[in-house]
Amino acid sequence: MTSLRRLAFALGTITFSVIALSASSTASAPLQLVGGGKGGGTPADVLATVPTPLFSKPAKVTALTKTWTNLAFVAMGGTDNLTKISRVDATFEFENPAVKMDLEISAGNDGSARIIRTVECLNSKSPKEEVTISIPAKSSTISAIDKNGTQEFEASDETLATLKRVADMWNPMLTALGQFEEIERVEPAVYGGVACNALVLAKPRLPGLQSGKLYLDAATNLPVGYETNVVRDIVISGQSTILEWQTESSIKVPKMIRLEGPDGVTDLSIKQVKLTLVGGAVS
């Protein structure tokens, strides 16, 4: 397996259980679709106009998917702001007792992206390993720079999508719809003691991915949890909890996320995030 494919596989496994929120409110509130005005936007336009460098938009967006995506986007800062994003620059830090991994992401809505991954084994004296992946706009030729020099690869659509999808980790809704094509149904649920609406996701878009649920706080419509099941010889369950939010350009972005799976607990910190908006943010 080439270093590029190993990186794509590693980053792909991250996105199986990334994004959830530990919210404080437990009150339930009537659901209302917000449209127009500051922070509004019509449901029909949400997925079509939110810029993302990744392949997160479903080929056919159902009415249910449009409605709940709009609700979550309004809660996160408004579709008026989200649709202005032209570039995402972020630094992610993953750490557990064995490994520390840093990801520096820079991605534009033209399809270009750069990923710098640094891995440090905490239980050994092995040197840090670093690889830089550069993805030009509208091209499948990827360059990878590591300790062995520079290599160029003609990436498959699957590898390209997996690499680019990492830049959507700051947005729970884009993460979910990068893995599933649609929301099949919505059902009441409780996540971490919080009354929620569980979005049951359907039509997995990644190999081995079986099922997923994204939980939205029933009172605020902010994402509060994300659960997935992956089949790799056995069914592997993953869960993530956002412990803290931060605000960038009037948009809510996770700051601290706890990932839980069969290999234990990994903390994900979004150390720095910059969202470049065309024309500035709407307050």
Image: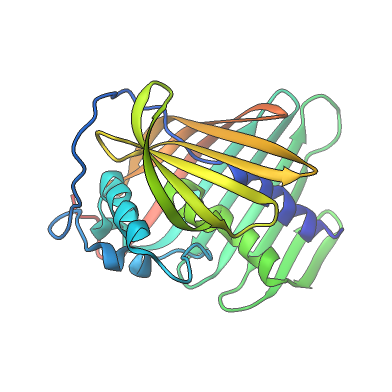
Quarter of the image with the N terminus is bottom right
Which residue shows up at 31% across the image and 45% down it? 76
Which residue shows up at 61% across the image and 35% down it? 238
* 17 lies left or right of 177: right
Which residue shows up at 57% across the image and 53% down it? 166
Q: Position of residue 167 (x, y in %)?
A: 53, 54
- Is any part of residue 46 visible from this angle? yes
As displayed, is residue 33 above or below residue 27? below
- Is any part of residue 103 visible from this angle? no
Q: Looking at this rendering, what residue extends furthest in the left direction?
A: 37
Q: Position of residue 75 (x, y in %)?
A: 27, 44
Q: Quick one: 83 or 181, which is closer to the camera?
A: 181
As displayed, is residue 56 above or below residue 187? below
* 137 lies left or right of 20: right
Q: Position of residue 64 (x, y in %)?
A: 34, 57
Q: Quick one: 14 or 57, which is closer to the camera?
A: 57
As displayed, is residue 241 above or below residue 156? above
As displayed, is residue 283 above or below residue 84? above
Which residue shows up at 45% across the image and 42% down it? 214
* 281 lies left or right of 12: left
